[in-house]
Amino acid sequence: MRNALPAAVPSLFVFALLSSQASAQQAHDWLDRMNRAVEELNYRGTFVHVLDGTPETLHIVHRNADGQSGERILSLDGASREIVRQGARVQGIFPDRRLVLFETRRDVSPLATALPSDTAELAPHYSIELGGSERVANRAVQVLEIKPRDEFRYGYMLWLDQETAMPLKSHLVDEQGKVVEEILFTDIEFPADIPAAALEPTIDTAGFTMQRAADAKPLDASIPWRAAILPGGFKLSIATESRIAGSDTPVGHLVYSDGLATVSVFIEDPATEAEVGEGFSTMGSTNVYSLTLSSGQKATAIGEVPRQTVRTIASSLVAQ
Amino acid sequence: MTDQINDQISAFIDNELSADESALLMRRFERDTEARARAMRYTLIGSSLRGELLEPHPSVLRQRISAALSGNAPPSAPRAREPWNDRWARPLLGLGIAATVAIVAIGTLRSLNEASLPAGNVVTSGGLPLTVSSDPAYVVPQATDPSGVGAPIRLTNYLMHHGEFASGLTRTSVNSNVLGGAIEPAAVSDAAVSNAKPIPVAGEGLE
């Protein structure tokens, strides 16, 4: 008996290690289910988006049928703006500007926005832990906490529907632990079918200015710019030219991702892009950093990441 | 807009006005675009709080207006009036939603109530009497910039493109930011942002 305890210590250690790995895998599985649920399920509901204590109510319809997903989101407050996405076509309707923006994205592999399949890829940069069970919007949810391991990315608290893994509530948490943004569904349903008509814009756009991207100039398959300095885990997933509504000239578009957070970099000639000022700006929880490159082009990095991350990426752009 | 009119509008939507009071309010709607717009907003908010808003059609308001225009008495006798805020808060109690939801929703309501609509607001499909059976009417503020483009729309372009590549974790967040749309120069300088340096990465390629 006296020798039994030392002999048991390695076994206990191995058991604890295996339990920890199993728990991490379980948490990752929830994350993977959530990522697929947002894209693949049919759902509609109302959610509240809270920024700096200011709430805004929005209505969402998401439809996945015949291998193509689409979505319509309508702001119920203020100017009643609306975004409608059907496949690669996106339109933003802004009644306060009497403006409709038509954007089209180039075909890209869904893998470009998929989560890493291996927990080991996220582990150096985030700790992902399962929390308890709670209720949100009168549904049972599983809490998932994602903590960043450095100050180049935000953390997340997620309340995932037990049945579908849909995030019914989420917190975006900054480097100081402050909740930057909250999203909270007040009601949601998951119909087996949603008619295609549910994705039709509901705002009357008669008399609005319609801005489409000019398609006279063919798109270049690649662009030469790359970030020379990246926070750990961020990798280039897309480097292409895109068309922007209201612009005759395509813009360069780089997408960097660490598996959870995404940063886009847009590179454009200054003659066509005179609106975005230099330095920092924000759009809700999105941080933006703009500067002029050595070529004279304007570069703008955008992402749901801390300010130092968009600045680091934009500031280190070099032509290859 | 006075509290009395607010109270009348919400009582009308809740079917708590007599036929005579409804007729008076109808006449006000005909000449007061702000009152019409407010009625629409209250209907949407009430439906949202009650979890009824699966499609943004202001059917409740249409039914009430149709009944008032046709001279039909409300289907039930007017109920005793309650304080305005109590009436809107009441549906929350029955929803079984977490307390945080209630706080956020009431906050939304308060912020909307406090917001004043700019002069010249219009309802896109015209006067209410003509729209009760047509497409949904939305409050569309007049453009402040006749060119229709205005201040930095390019960031909105960028954010919409960025959202197409966001993961399921942040897609809804990005779209909400586009719809919220306040483009604000951040009140920070480079010096106020952390100077932590990441490890340089050389020659990374497409994954």
Image (tube, coloured by chain):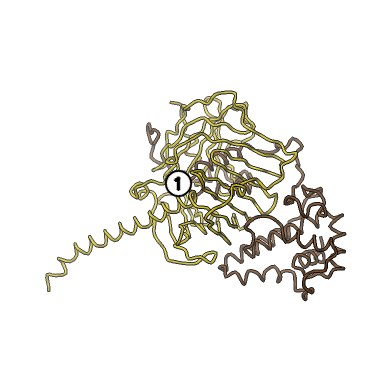
Chain colours: A yellow, B brown
- Asked if residue A211 is positioned above or below residue A165 in the image, the reply reads above
Q: Is residue A41 left or right of residue A282?
A: left
User: How many numbered marks are there?
Assistant: 1
Q: Which residue is mark 1?
A: A152
Chain letter for mark 1, please.
A
Which residue is the extreme one toward the top? A217
Query: Which type of secondary structure does the marked residue at label 1 adopt?
Result: loop
Quarter of the picture holding the C terminus of chain B: top left
In the image, residue B159 lies at what x, y percent?
Answer: 57, 41
Question: Crowdedness of circle 1 by 10 Å Cα count: few (<14), some, many (20+)?
Answer: many
Q: Is residue B62 left or right of residue A114?
A: right
Which three-letter amino acid code belongs to the residue tagged 1?
A: Phe
Q: Quadrant of residue A28?
A: bottom left
Residue drawn at 31 percent across, 58 percent down: A22
- Asked if residue A107 is positioned above or below residue B78 in the image, the reply reads above
- Asked if residue A31 is positioned above or below residue B75 in the image, the reply reads above
Camera-nearest residue between B135 and A170: B135
In the image, residue A44 lies at what x, y percent?
Answer: 57, 55
